[in-house]
Amino acid sequence: MLKSSFNAMQVFGKLLSCLVILSSLIFVGFSMAADITNHQNSKQQNTRKLNDVQQAIAKQESNIFNTNKNRSTLEQQLKNDDLAIAKAVKTISDTNQQLKVTNKKIAALSKEKQQLAVQKNQQERILAQQLRSAYTTGQHSYLKLVLNQDESKKIQRTISYYQYLNKARIKEIDKFQATITQLMQVTTQHQEQVAQLKTLNLNQKKQQNSLSKNKNKRSNTLAYLNKKLLSSKQQLAKLKSEEANLTAALQKLTALIRAEINLMGLSKLKRKLSWPIKGRLLRSFGSQKQGYLKWKGVLLGAPIGRQVQTIHNGTILFSDWLKGYGLLIVIDHGNGYMSLYAHNQALLKSVGDRVETGEPIALVGQSGGQDQAGLYFEIRHQGKAVNPKLWCK
């Protein structure tokens, strides 16, 4: 009996142990299932966050790409606007020169016309006097004087005088006819020049209207371009790229330079050269430009349209639009020396032209995206920028 009871207790104990173990396993199973579920939820959340980040990055990259694309388009439009303004200004400059020449011609022709009119009046008086003299001294015909046998010596003198007067009269008549012909020619030329002056004035008005439209167009382009603001890092990269572009262009130009015997460079001209324009110094050589970049030349403020003059004789190496510098002229002075003139409104010289000291080469402007008028000026030796103040006084 006791033995049976003991066996029953053992069985119950084992059964109880199994129940405990089973309960533990069920609890662990539920815990593991909960952990798995939490892990999956966390993973899904992280995946969603990662996707959001990736989309944000893609969107930012797209914005940067679109901004750069838009800036590139606007910068190309700015170039076109600058070139259109330069063309209009150059045409107006040429027209003004033609107007000056035409006005001088008209003034000279008016003076010549007046002199010819005076000369004509004088010749008319001389002819009138000769006719009166011939009438008073020659009451008898030339044939009567020849046939008259009385007082032959007196008659001979009269005939000689008569012939002299006749020749003088014929000579004056020829002069008078030449004067009339010349006066008619001068009058015709004068009328043609007056008509040309009228045409030039009309063309000038059209050119001024075209210039005004191009300036407004450029202002709008610049306004849109300024809306696409760049970060300091992007601005630094932009300026660095523009400087590298200029350096590469100068290196190519240097390779094309042919030494000229009569170009002696600038080494002996320190403190002897004149500045290309009279203007206020806005930026000095070596001052901070952006980040670690420094100004390699000087920026001089001056009114739009003021003439830019070359500092010394030389040959034009470059005359065109360059990104970041606008309408740019580069002059070779020999022995590795160059001078650069940027942000012009119009260029007056072409590649290959020989220029002398003080000769006008451009007009002050604000091309290349500048918000104020001025001239950017550099002097370089062997490709390295040097302080212009060491040469210009």
Image (tube, rainbow, N blue to C red):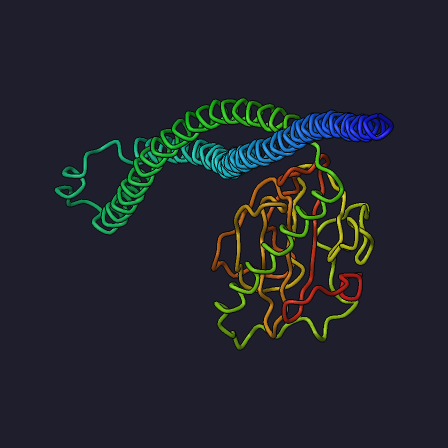
Quadrant for residue 211, please give it.
top right
Q: Nearer the viewer, residue 381 or 10?
A: 10
Q: Residue furthest front?
A: 1
Coordinates of residue 176 in the picture (x, y in percent): 33, 36
Coordinates of residue 258 in the picture (x, y in percent): 48, 72
Q: Is residue 104 visible?
A: no
In the image, residue 381 above or below residue 3: below
Q: Residue furthest right?
A: 2
Q: Residue furthest bottom?
A: 261
In the image, residue 36 above or below residue 318: above
What residue appears at the point 20 percent right and 49 percent down from the top-left corner?
A: 152
Q: Nearer the viewer, residue 373 or 44?
A: 44
The number of discs equals: 0
Coordinates of residue 354 in the picture (x, y in percent): 52, 61
In the image, residue 89 above or below residue 254: above
Tell me if 140 is positioned left or right of 101 in this view. left
Tell me if 135 is positioned left or right of 68 in this view. left
Quadrant for residue 263, please give it.
bottom right
What residue appears at the point 73 percent right and 30 percent down from the top-left corner?
A: 32
Coordinates of residue 372 in the picture (x, y in percent): 73, 36
Name the image quarter holding the C terminus.
Answer: bottom right
What residue appears at the point 62 percent right and 24 percent down from the top-left corner?
A: 220
Q: Is residue 66 visible?
A: yes
What residue appears at the point 23 percent right and 49 percent down from the top-left corner?
A: 156
Q: Nearer the viewer, residue 348 or 356?
A: 348
Q: Nearer the viewer, residue 70 or 157?
A: 70
Name the image quarter holding the N terminus.
Answer: top right
Tell me if 50 is positioned left or right of 109 in this view. right
